[in-house]
Image (cartoon, rainbow, N blue to C red):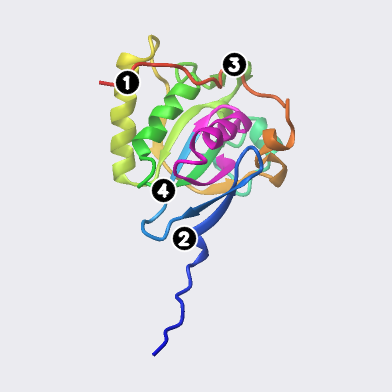
Amino acid sequence: MSFARPLISQPFLRSLLTMSGKPVCIDNSTTAAQKATFAAGCFWGVEKMFRESFASRGLVEARVGYTGGLSSNPLYRAVCSGQTGHSEALQVTFDPQKVSYRQLVEFFYQMHDPTTFHRQGADQGSQYRSAIFYHNQEQEQVARQVTQKVNEQWWKNKVTTEIVPAGEWWDAEQYHQQYLNKNPGGYECPNHVLRKFPPLL
């Protein structure tokens, strides 16, 4: 007796282009992938740093886009005006067996300055705010616990990061996706550097 080979659906097996342009195949058939959404200033550099750090250890997909605003289907120019209320953000899909949500949140607090209200470097406005958009109660709990710890142990000034429920998400225009991979030497916010902090207690 022979059996047909079961098909693996697309959400469980994806191909990801790293910053070098090489595909990384993630077999996600044994666990459910999860989403995490962060805002940390200009999304070009945020995406680059998350891809470089997690492409080979749990990152399934990363998309830059807009969230946290009032209007539907926002466009880049409108978001940049600060009038729509959206933030430039990064939404990642990750394998929790390879990287935990807590690790992603800690990395988020290392790669930008969460103490400057609605500002990263010279980029000012609510669209550049620091924010964590949680997708479930567990993520909210982790985000608040880590935020309290980094406020006490890592940053001298008060952390201003918003912790709010994830709302509707809109992908940014295609030319923004992996922008710094397509445009080497393009603008990167100087605040987007990985800081070396001691492990949180």
Q: Residues within 10 Å of mark 1 (few under 14, many from 20)?
A: few
- The numbered mark at residue 95 is 4
Separation (CA) of disc 4 from disc 2: 10 Å
Q: Nearer the viewer, mark 4 or mark 3?
A: 4
User: Which of marks 2 and 1 precedes in the sequence?
Assistant: 2
- The numbered mark at residue 121 is 3
Q: Position of residue 184 (x, y in %)?
A: 73, 30
- The numbered mark at residue 12 is 2
18 shown above or below 114: below
**Amino acid type, callout 2:** Phe
Q: Position of residue 10 (x, y in %)?
A: 52, 63
User: Which of marks 1 and 4 precedes in the sequence?
Assistant: 4
Residue 86 within the segment the image draws in magenta = no
**Amino acid type, callout 1:** Pro
Secondary structure of the residue carrying numbered label 4: loop
Residue bounds of the magenta highlight: 39-66
